[in-house]
Amino acid sequence: MNTSSEQLVDAMDDDEAKQQFTDAEKTLGASMGLIVFLGISKLICGSVGIYGAITYKVWAVAISLAFYCVEFAHNLFAMNIIGLLMPGFFAYPHVFFMKEVKEGIMSEENYELEKQSCCCV
């Protein structure tokens, strides 16, 4: 039994249109695989970043930051101005969290002293 896209291609009269439709369908399938891969990668990197923030591990937060930097670079090369904003907004707290952990400002030992500066308390 033919799928709906195969039925659509079979109903076309123009051979060139059939080929273009088939090529576009193949490209979309490859793009969808890339989109799924990037989504899963972003989920994993974000989860590692959350783990790093909870346990004060700079390397784990750096993994999450690296993904935002790659996303920023992609949007820069694609000249997507709005796409540059989101990774930039998310990278900013990662950079400063890593800086504070390295300087000893934020750690498990002094978290109680820093907790009052959080807007959530």
Image (tube, rainbow, N blue to C red):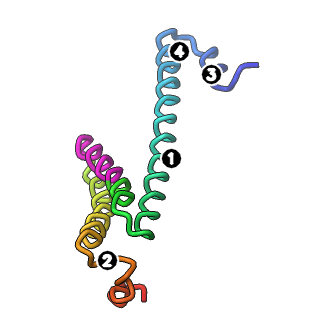
Q: Quadrant of residue 96?
A: bottom left
Secondary structure beneath dot 1 equals helix
- Which residue type carries mark 2? Met
Q: Is residue 67 left or right of residue 39?
A: left
Q: Quadrant of residue 58?
A: bottom left
Residue with the mark numbered 3 = 8
Which residue appears at 46% of the width and 46% of the height? 41
Which residue appears at 33% of the width and 86% of the height? 114
Disc with the residue nearer the chain's start (1 vs 3): 3
Q: Position of residue 60 (x, y in %)?
A: 39, 58
Q: Position of residue 28 (x, y in %)?
A: 49, 30
In the orientation shown, which residue stands out farthest toward the top? 15
Whether label 2 touches label 4, CB < 8 Å: no
Residue with the mark numbered 4 = 18
Q: Which stretch appears magenta?
A: 66-79
Q: Position of residue 75 (x, y in %)?
A: 28, 46
Disc with the residue nearer the chain's start (3 vs 2): 3
Neighbours of disc 3 within 10 Å: few (<14), some (14-19), many (20+): few
Which residue appears at 50% of the width and 36% of the height? 32
Residue with the mark numbered 1 = 40
Rendered position, 84 above or below 19: below
Q: Viewer-proximal residue, 59 or 12?
A: 59
Q: CA distance from mark 1 to mark 3?
A: 32 Å
